[in-house]
Image (cartoon, helix red, strand yellow):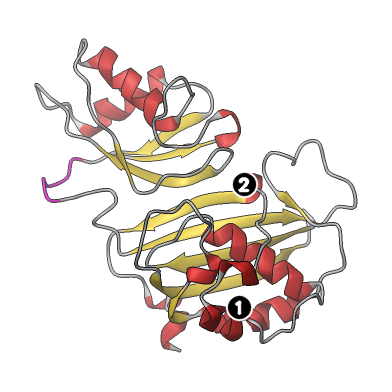
Amino acid sequence: MTMAYDGHLFHGFQMQPNQRTVQGTVEQALIKMTKGKRVIVEGSGRTDSGVHAIGQVIHFDYPGNQIPANKMILALNSMMPMDIIFNDCEIVNEDFHARYSIKGKWYRYRVSLDHFVNPFKRFYTGHYPYPIDIQKMQEAAKDLLGTHDFTSFAASGGQIINKVRTMYYVNVEKDEKENEIVFDFICSGFLYNMVRILVATLLEIGNGKRPVNDFPRIIKAKDRQEVRETAQASGLYLYHVFYDELPKKYRQDLE
């Protein structure tokens, strides 16, 4: 099932005791549907507290009689709070796994450039009220493409040992209407807080605090101390998950 949620009032995706989580909310609805049987929900990724999703994917094994996909989406949406909605549902083969079957993942990050924090955006964008050069960030982003060890961009607390990932696509552009910068990253997988650390580093480059060609040096260092800033959770969106090979238009690493 593909779902969207406003992460502001959730303590992240993953179930946690005495906390409101996305996984917990969905599993509670499934318990009602199964009259008390716990159904474990597996997600494509564990978004943090305050992080949103437009295209989060989950899977679960539903016990008992098979419910058609169109009925399952109706049933679950009828029990969801206002900050979760399911947009797609299909019955898949038993070898499908929401996390392990992934070919690539797309995160989007939005940064407001307004001088003051807009009260209507404060939970849905990052905020950077300083001079910024979009072209510098676009130029620097090219150095992220390809296969690298992204240790320098992984926050402590992550449990993944192998930090080598392939970055397929990076785009930085200005949304003139909203006065925002939109960052898009498509990668084979992401490390803990990786997107938020990359965004913070790109903003420093755009502001002139770092040279345009700083990414190769940072990547080579494999040291989180090289980039200490992390952008706010509020601007981050899990945008799309790829389970088929990526379309060529998203393979900038091959250009």
Q: Which residues make up the magenta segment?
A: 91-95
| Label 2: element kind | helix
The relative height of residue 78 versus residue 181 in the rendered view (above or below) is above
Q: Which amino acid does label 1 sit on?
A: Ala
Tell whether 111 sits left or right of 195.
right
Residue at the far top in the pictured view: 35
Q: Where is residue 101 in the image (x, y as percent from the top left)?
A: 24, 57
Is most of the magenta stretch helix, strand or loop? Answer: loop
Closest to the observer: 242 or 42?
Answer: 42
**Residue found at x 28% / y 21%:** 30
Q: Position of residue 196 (x, y in %)?
A: 60, 58
The residue carrying pointer 2 sits among few (fewer than 14), some (14 to 19) or many (20 or more) residues within 10 Å by Cα, namely: many
| Label 1: element kind | helix
Q: Name the residue under label 1.
A: 141
The relative height of residue 168 versus residue 38 in the rendered view (above or below) is below
Closest to the observer: 5 or 214?
Answer: 214
Membership of 145 in magenta stretch = no
**Residue found at x 24% / y 31%:** 40
Q: Mark 2 points at which residue?
A: 233
